[in-house]
Image (cartoon, rainbow, N blue to C red):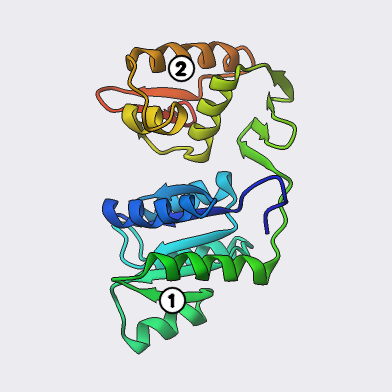
Amino acid sequence: MGTSHEPCRALVVDDEENVAYLASTALQLDGWDTAVAESARDALNVAESFRPDVIVLDVMLPDLDGFEVCERLRRQGSTTPVIFLSARDTTADRVRGLTNGGDDYLTKPFSVEELVARCRLRVRRTGTERDDVLRYRDLEIDEHAHRVTRAGAVVHLSPTEYRLLRYLLLNAERVLTRSQILDHVWDYDFGGDARVLETYVSYLRKKLEAQGPRLIYTVRGVGYALRLPPA
């Protein structure tokens, strides 16, 4: 379970935007930090960097099914509790999910209150501890110390730069729209010019690239992504 100074983390994996939004918002309102992935590939990447306390995992994903994602996580040594969330409600599906590494199985349509309760229960049962450090390659954020390092060197950020980098890191390798970033970093009632985001991305790039290659990329017409340089 998360330490007293930091909320627990949930990774919601679902390619249906409305379901992912509903589940992640319910958890956020309960005090959780959340990240969202829309595919199996995204889920495996985000799980590595975000290090969730629980994973809410849809079975029917566009690339691999959720059962295979769970199996891969277990083969990689992950013990993070997995709650399957699926419209497939046959006994065979439930048995497969619960015997291939899953910890719980919730069918759609679902109650958000029940989902939150099941997430809480799984975290309490595992008693997961974290060291409060987010990592992506040579980039680290120590959330307890509020310190950012790259390749071992301290990167001094303003509070807004820190929030922006943290949100990008929590969603590493996902393309985030400008509106998503503005909503999460500057709050939902932000009403200013979106050019403020470009300004802060520029600040962040300059500070991070002093210690290594570019990590924050512009996706033209969409937004930004924190990821490795193209091969």
Name the residue: 51% across, 63% down: 72
Left or right of 164 in this view: 26:
left
Could you say which disc has been placed on residue 39 in the image?
A: none
Work out which quarter of the rendered image holds the N terminus and state it: bottom right
Helix, strand or loop for disc 2: helix
x then y, percent, for residue 135:
63, 38
Name the residue: 43% across, 11% down: 199
x then y, percent, for residue 215:
50, 24
Category of crowding for the residue at label 1, using alpha-carbon neighbours closer than 10 angstroms: few (below 14), some (14–19), many (at least 20): many
Between 128 and 32, the residue placed more toward the observer is 32
x then y, percent, for residue 213:
55, 19
Does label 1 or label 2 sit earlier along the sequence? 1
Category of crowding for the residue at label 2, using alpha-carbon neighbours closer than 10 angstroms: few (below 14), some (14–19), many (at least 20): some
Specify the quadrant of the image occupied by residue 66.
bottom left
In the picture of the structure, the residue carrying the numbered disc 1 is 105
Badge 2 amino acid: Val
Real-space Cα distance between discs 1 and 2? 40 Å
Specify the quadrant of the image occupied by residue 112.
bottom left
Helix, strand or loop for disc 1: strand
In the picture of the structure, the residue carrying the numbered disc 2 is 201
Badge 1 amino acid: Tyr
Name the residue: 51% across, 69% down: 117
Left or right of 138 in this view: 214:
left
Work out which quarter of the rendered image holds the C terminus and state it: top left
